[in-house]
């Protein structure tokens, strides 16, 4: 069974041909360093690191997991050495500003690297990407003193970061949290409480771990408006800025999880730990959303990484496995045919392929907006921020839901072999299952999209993307799929207006429609990106480019998406239009067994 190999040809096709990243990088200062040669070298290096170093560790780490020994977490064999090489080779600092020791390259390029490493080893990569999110949050909201003390070592990767959000009684309702922060005479705070589900909360891979912790000040208002954000190091710093005495923060236990066994998911106890306020008092949740939103895009890539890796293993197996005679024989002299000759197996393989490649385009389209939201041009910056606000819940929700489907297909394609550990595909299903849950469950993503974004703006947040899609469609009117995309855009508008009218009279209408609205939106946005891919692929074929064989496969995969997968959008539209009564009219006491 093969291990993961980065799909460099497709990644380059999406970045260069479909989304025009070479021209995009010339529009802002950080991008000027990202010449085509530099980008190609970075992608090649990340591909090699992912395949040679990370992928071979993945299966063993799933079996061995993490262990808590006398309060210290032992990570799986090879993880610390791989992390050290990642840091030494400069990968940690790639997309961070030079002013804090970073390389000053675009964030989008860092996201391309992230796709490869997370596809190879999801659990290991979480030790990395949580630090990236903590760096971004501290950079945006921390005081200059905290930035100077902590950012250089975090950017380098010598210190790592976490996000400490929820507690045993909270779940996603962070307004219920009880961890308290009491002022000290020196201007710092004493934090007391317990946090659960803290990924990478304790390990020995770095010299310090910097926890970003939500807590309440003594006079804080109730609910989410009374939450503040604090930086709490594992080791306090001495006068020279180096780790000194251990802070009063510890790992109480490790969660026993369904998947991602190689990552230490901890219960973290704060027993009067010293912490430092980040941002304004009682504005902590707003600050933490910088971390949360970046993490949601990373979670989408985690999920798509499992689609890609599972597809590669499925395809390799389907080409070699001889079983039953196909309706159209490949080799009549043999007793059976490769299962890739069977139509139903191809249905599953093409579903994986179409979703992996479509979701990749969605991730890189979002990555492009991440670059542009820091543009010096106010109009460009505002449009990118609007697009990201809309697309982040779509990407997180849609990609993770389709990852569950695609990794399940991998198990099905391998049959009984897929259900046993030695073939490796069942790990993808277990590992990706968390992606639909953490950083806000997909029900919450739907509510964020429909309630807080679309209806709260009276549909205005949709218009920049709609204008872009329709503008592109006007240049692609000869493509057979253009009409389907334009029709879905108009349906998107009408569904939004209909839900707005219903919601004004019945509060449950938004909640009952939100998940289906999110999925409808996902199928539409990915269809738009497949249409863009179509236009490029057809031009490559007409130009008799050396990509023509690749381009023919692109057109076939797009045809499958439009004819086999996109019709699902109508099922979601029909479901959300039925209203809330079929969900809410049954009295709660009538749910019985």
Image (spheres, helix red, strand yellow):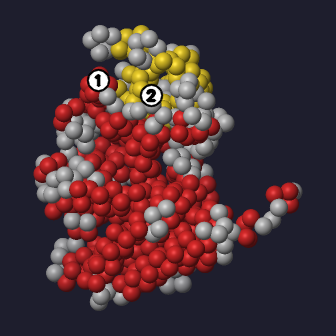
- Provide the residue designation for mark 1: 145
Q: Work out whether residue 96 or residue 88 is closer to the camera in this orientation and state it.
A: 96
Q: Is residue 511 above or below residue 58?
A: below
Locate residue 400 relative to residue 16 in the image: left or right: right
The N terminus appears in which quarter of the rendering? bottom left
Sort mark 1 into few (<14), some (14-19) or many (20+) by Cα contacts within 10 Å.
few
| Snapshot quadrant of residue 381 | bottom left
Give the left or right position of residue 262, taking residue 465 as reference. right
Front residue of this view, candidates 415 and 457: 457
Q: What is the x, y in percent for residue 554?
A: 33, 74
Would you name the residue on which mark 2 appears? 230
Question: Image quarter for residue 85?
Answer: top left
CA–CA distance in space, label 2 to label 1: 14 Å
Quarter of the rendering occupied by the C terminus: bottom right
Say which residue appears at 16% left-offset and 53% top-offset: 28
Q: Is disc 2 placed on a helix, strand or loop?
A: strand
> How many dots with numbers?
2
The vertical placement of 447 against 97, above or below, is: below
Instruction: Give x and y (percent) for residue 149.
Output: 29, 22
Residue 102 location, quadrant:
top left
């Amino acid at each position: 069974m093969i291990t993961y190999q980065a799909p460099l040809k497709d990644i380059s096709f999406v970045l260069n041909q479909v989304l025009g990243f070479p021209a995009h990088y010339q529009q802002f200062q950080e991008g000027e360093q990202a010449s085509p040669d530099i980008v190609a070298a970075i992608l090649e290096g990340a591909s090699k690191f992912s395949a040679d170093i990370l992928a071979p560790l993945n299966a063993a780490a799933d079996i061995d997991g993490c262990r808590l020994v006398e309060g210290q977490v032992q990570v799986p064999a090879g993880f610390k050495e791989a992390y050290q090489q990642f840091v030494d080779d400069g990968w940690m600092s790639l997309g961070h500003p030079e002013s804090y020791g970073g390389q000053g390259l675009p964030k989008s390029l860092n996201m391309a690297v992230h796709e490869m490493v997370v596809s190879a080893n999801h659990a290991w990569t979480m030790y990395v990407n949580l630090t990236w999110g903590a760096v971004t949050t501290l950079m945006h909201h921390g005081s200059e003193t905290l930035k100077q003390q902590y950012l250089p070592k975090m950017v380098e990767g010598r210190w790592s970061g976490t996000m400490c959000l929820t507690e045993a009684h909270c779940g996603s309702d962070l307004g219920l949290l009880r961890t308290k922060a009491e002022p000290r005479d020196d201007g710092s705070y004493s934090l007391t409480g317990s946090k659960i589900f803290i990924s990478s909360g304790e390990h020995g891979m770095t010299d310090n771990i910097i926890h970003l912790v939500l807590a309440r000040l003594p006079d804080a208002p109730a609910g989410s408006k009374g939450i503040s954000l604090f930086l709490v190091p594992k080791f306090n710093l001495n006068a020279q800025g180096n780790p000194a005495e251990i802070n009063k923060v510890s790992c109480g236990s490790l969660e026993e999880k369904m998947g991602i066994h190689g990552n230490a998911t901890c219960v973290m106890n704060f027993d009067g730990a010293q912490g430092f306020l980040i941002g304004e008092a009682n504005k902590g949740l707003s600050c933490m959303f910088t971390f949360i939103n970046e993490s949601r895009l990373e979670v989408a890539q985690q999920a798509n990484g499992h689609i890609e890796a599972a597809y590669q293993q499925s395809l390799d197996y389907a080409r070699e496995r001889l079983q039953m005679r196909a309706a159209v024989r490949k080799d009549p002299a043999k007793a059976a045919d490769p299962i890739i000759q069977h139509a139903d197996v191809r249905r599953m393989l093409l579903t994986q392929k179409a979703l992996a490649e479509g979701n990749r385009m969605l991730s890189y389209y979002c990555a492009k907006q991440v670059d542009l939201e820091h543009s010096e041009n106010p109009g460009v910056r505002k449009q990118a921020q609007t697009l990201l606000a809309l697309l982040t819940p779509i990407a997180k929700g849609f990609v993770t839901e389709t990852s569950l489907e695609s990794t399940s297909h991998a198990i099905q394609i391998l049959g009984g072999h897929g259900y046993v550990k030695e073939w490796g595909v069942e790990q993808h299903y277990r590992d990706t299952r968390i992606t639909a849950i953490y950083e806000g469950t997909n029900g919450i993503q739907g509510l964020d999209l429909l309630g807080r974004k679309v209806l709260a703006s009276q549909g205005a947040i949709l218009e920049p993307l709609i204008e872009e899609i329709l503008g592109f469609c006007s240049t692609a009117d000869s493509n057979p799929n253009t009409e389907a995309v334009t029709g879905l855009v108009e349906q998107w508008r009408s569904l939004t207006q209909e839900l707005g009218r219903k919601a004004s009279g019945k509060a449950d209408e938004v909640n009952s429609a939100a998940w289906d609205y999110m999925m409808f939106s996902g199928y539409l946005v990915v269809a738009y990106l497949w249409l863009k891919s179509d236009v490029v692929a057809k031009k490559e074929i007409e130009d008799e480019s050396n990509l023509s064989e690749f381009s023919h496969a692109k057109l076939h995969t797009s045809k499958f998406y439009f004819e086999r997968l996109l019709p699902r959008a109508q099922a979601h539209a029909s479901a959300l239009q039925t209203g809330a009564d079929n969900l809410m009219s049954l009295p709660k006491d009538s749910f019985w067994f």
